[in-house]
Image (cartoon, rainbow, N blue to C red):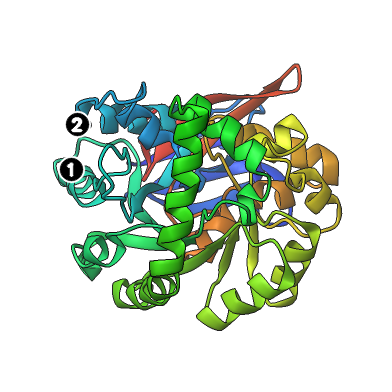
Amino acid sequence: MDMIITNAKIICETEVIDGTVQVKNGQIADITPGRSHIPGAIDFDGDMLMPGLVELHTDNLERHLEPRPKVDWPHGAAILAHDAELASAGITTVFDALRVGSITKQGSTYTPYARRVASEIMDLRAKGALKINHYIHLRAEVCSDTLETEFAQFTPEDRVGLVSLMDHTPGQRQFRDLGALKTYMSKKRAMSDADFDAHVDHLLTLRAANGDRHEAATVAEARRLGAVLASHDDTVAQHVDVSSGYGVKLAEFPTTVEAAQACTDHGIAVMMGAPNLIRGGSHSGNVAAHELAQLGLLDIISSDYVPYALLSSAFLLADLWDDLPRAIATVTANPARSVGLMDRGVIGPGLHADLLRIKRIDGNAVIRGVWCHGRQVG
């Protein structure tokens, strides 16, 4: 929990300095320029020292819970594997995304699971089994039957720090292109054409019956749980106007420049996915993250479905902007502050010693050490 790191290129909020960082009791105690000659100091040999990554929106846990369609993996093993994978990717704080809002239609794969998994995560955390910091991110599906019932199972003591208002009604927002949705569902759930048509019809029926009520319930539940409210897949300025009225502070993956600009105008932080940035575009045909970055409309990056992409995307932005501290903030300080975590995301006295040792090799950001609260976890 106590250590001295020296001969490091320290990525601070606005500059990079060659210096030394002292850690005591899992917190950053001091930052000084120059090299320390105290015995036992860890010599970084000129490697970069940066804050641990803060991940707000990841599908990674669900991938471990269901590694193949209809395969329900033992949850404890899945959570531990997820935790270890994120630690190895430099993520020291994660908001584990869990869906609330299920579909009761016979044969549906969208069944309740969030309450059980959240309890299992918190139990493993209480027993000291996890390497990194875990919070809960509830993704509220308005096209569902059971949203209100599932929300009622959570309390303000459950570390729910983020609630996303998700509307995956076919034909709008993320899935304006029904062809893209069909491709996604045929691969994800092995749906036939007939199954897909029935799925779309059922979602449209659910939206008409429950959508407005579920939207209002989600806004109220976020307040009750003390969580930050996020919008998802805003497409037009009108969507953002509604989001702003709800008190949304964070926009996950706006699909157009129009929506991203409206978010910025309303003071809503814009988050985009690292895979979009690295691949050069959205797999759903929506706006490219690099276009928003070039327009100054990008604040936060999420790994989405590839954990290591979070670090890689930060250095891609650093090259694009020619501003390393600004780029690193999109995966550290900015996501932390957007959800009210003011004790991490920056290398500064009194803050958590969540730290990464990074070396760039052939353009790749290579992790050479990971510390969470001053304890080495990778």
- Seen in the picture, residue 263 relative to 150 is either above or below; the reply is below
Q: Position of residue 288 (x, y in %)?
A: 77, 44
| Tag shown at residue 120 | 1
Q: Position of residue 349 (x, y in %)?
A: 49, 59
| Tag shown at residue 330 | none
Q: Which residue in the rendered view is the most extreme toward the bottom?
A: 245
**Left or right: where does residue 83 sit relative to residue 35?**
left
- Seen in the picture, residue 118 relative to 261 is either above or below; the reply is above
Instruction: State which tag comes first along the sequence, 1 or 2.
Output: 2
For residue 87, which quarter of the picture?
top left
Q: Position of residue 316 (x, y in %)?
A: 75, 35
* Amino acid at pointer 2: Gly
Q: Which residue in the rendered view is the most extreme toward the top?
A: 362
The residue pinned by badge 2 equals 76
Determine whether the residue tagged by mark 2 lies in a helix, strand or loop: helix
Q: Residues within 10 Å of mark 2 (few under 14, many from 20)?
A: some
Residue plotted at (63% across, 56% down): 173
* Amino acid at pointer 1: Glu
Is residue 83 in view from this perspective?
yes
